[in-house]
């Protein structure tokens, strides 16, 4: 496991073409390439200084050669700083763009939803079956759009360090009950068994209920989506010293080992999504991890392909 991870880190570090594509730069502009060149220049410089000091007695030659080496290193250092600066600026612009675009889209989508509700309430019973079906489909699509826009806005807030949490003291069991109730129709639709068992002990945490529901909705809907028909999803809640640990276990498609290091990256969707032909944006886990970490907890997982996955998160308990 460790060897595999190390190999991937080394491979990613030296895969300059992939890095250039990811950063939107040319290969020679990537920080890794410039670092390699800098390392090469340092080695050549050391050898050169050694050669010069062995063959020339004049201190002038030594000073000039050292000045040339320092100048070359300065130029390369400058290139590195500029390429990092360029990447940081592009990243900031992208985050701002996502934030502005999703803010602008929120209002018209809310209007569509409101007008659909108005249409349905103004003509109760007056719409034909076909009309009701079409309006239902429009409502479904616009709710989906609202969720995507909401996710993009959350991502922009996370990246700008502006994700606000309205924390209050709550019993985690109550929040999980609510999340399970929200997901019950999805589980029933695929004849999946959704189980939640927990001992009746107080498990109070200081959290933003709306955000923790987002985390649970993401983890539970993933477990259901990537398990499919007649599977089982179980939720366990356990007190561990000063923490409470939530565990969501499914017996679904699992996550291929080679993709497990990428699972919390923004927009990443594993190749297993094809197996269940599922819809998604690859933002849910990124958002969930950030919410849990900002609430003072941790989120992680274990998974075996074709056997299932278990997602865990822990939160600090409020001291009595
Ligand atoms: P998505 O919108 O694609 O579900 P997420 O960020 O929630 O985005 O998840 C990222 C990817 O992780 C998914 O596309 C899926 O490939 C994988 N994944 C997440 N949860 C599970 C799970 N319980 N079982 C198998 N794969 C999962």
Image (cartoon, grey):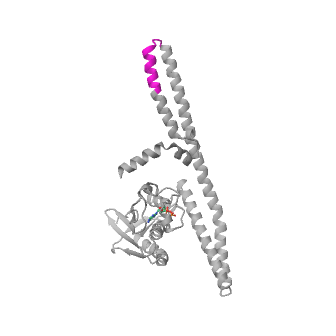
The quarter of the picture where residue 109 lies is: bottom right
47 relative to 34 in the view: left or right: left
Q: Is residue 166 visible?
A: no
Q: How many callouts does the rendering have?
A: 0
Question: Which span is picked out in magenta?
Answer: 44-58
Main SS of the magenta segment?
A: helix
Task: Pinpoint residue 177: horizontal percent, then vertical percent.
Answer: 43, 75
Judging depth in this view, the residue of 55 and 297 nearest the camera is 55
Question: In what quadrant of the picture does the C terminus appear?
Answer: bottom left
Judging depth in this view, the residue of 141 and 288 nearest the camera is 141
Task: Pinpoint residue 312: horizontal percent, then vertical percent.
Answer: 39, 63
Residue lying at the far left of the rendered structure: 241
Q: Which residue is drawn at 54% across and 32% down?
A: 76
- Queried whether the magenta region covers residue 51, the answer comes back as yes
Task: Pinpoint residue 201: horizontal percent, then vertical percent.
Answer: 33, 72
Q: Residue at x 43, y 66 (%)?
A: 253
Task: Pinpoint residue 171: horizontal percent, then vertical percent.
Answer: 40, 71
- Queried whether the magenta region covers residue 87, the answer comes back as no
Residue 63 to residue 270: above or below: above
Residue 196 to residue 241: above or below: below
Q: Is residue 29 visible?
A: yes
Residue lying at the far top of the rendered structure: 57
The quarter of the picture where residue 81 lies is: top right
Residue 167 to residue 137: above or below: above
């Amino acid at each position: 496991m460790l060897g595999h991870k190390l190999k991937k880190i080394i491979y990613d570090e030296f895969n300059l073409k992939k890095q250039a594509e990811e950063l939107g730069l040319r290969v020679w502009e990537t920080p890794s390439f410039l670092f390699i060149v800098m390392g090469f220049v340092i080695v050549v410089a050391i050898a050169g200084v050694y050669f010069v000091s062995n063959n020339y007695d004049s201190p002038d030659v030594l000073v000039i050669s050292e000045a040339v080496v320092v100048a070359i290193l300065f130029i390369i250092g400058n290139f590195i700083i500029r390429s990092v600066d360029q990447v940081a600026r592009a990243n900031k612009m992208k985050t701002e763009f996502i934030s502005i675009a999703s803010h602008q889209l929120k209002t018209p989508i809310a209007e569509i939803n409101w007008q659909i509700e108005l249409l349905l309430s103004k003509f109760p019973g007056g719409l034909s079956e076909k009309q009701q079906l079409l309006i239902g489909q429009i409502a479904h699509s616009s709710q989906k759009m609202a969720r995507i826009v909401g996710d993009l806005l959350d991502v922009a807030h996370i990246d700008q360090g502006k994700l606000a949490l309205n924390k209050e003291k709550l019993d985690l069991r109550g929040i999980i009950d609510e999340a399970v109730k929200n997901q019950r129709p999805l589980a029933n639709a695929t004849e999946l068994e959704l189980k939640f068992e927990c001992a009746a002990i107080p498990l109070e945490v200081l959290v933003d209920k709306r955000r923790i529901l987002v985390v649970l909705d993401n983890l539970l809907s993933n477990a259901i989506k990537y398990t499919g028909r007649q599977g089982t999803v179980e939720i366990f809640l356990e007190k561990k010293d000063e923490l409470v640990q939530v565990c969501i276990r499914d017996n679904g498609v699992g996550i291929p080992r080679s993709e497990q290091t990428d699972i919390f990256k923004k927009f990443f969707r594993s190749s297993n999504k094809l197996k269940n032909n599922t819809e998604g944006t690859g933002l849910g886990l990124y958002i969930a991890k950030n919410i849990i970490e900002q609430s003072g907890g941790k989120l992680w997982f274990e998974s075996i392909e074709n056997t299932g996955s278990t997602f865990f998160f822990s939160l600090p308990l409020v001291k009595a």
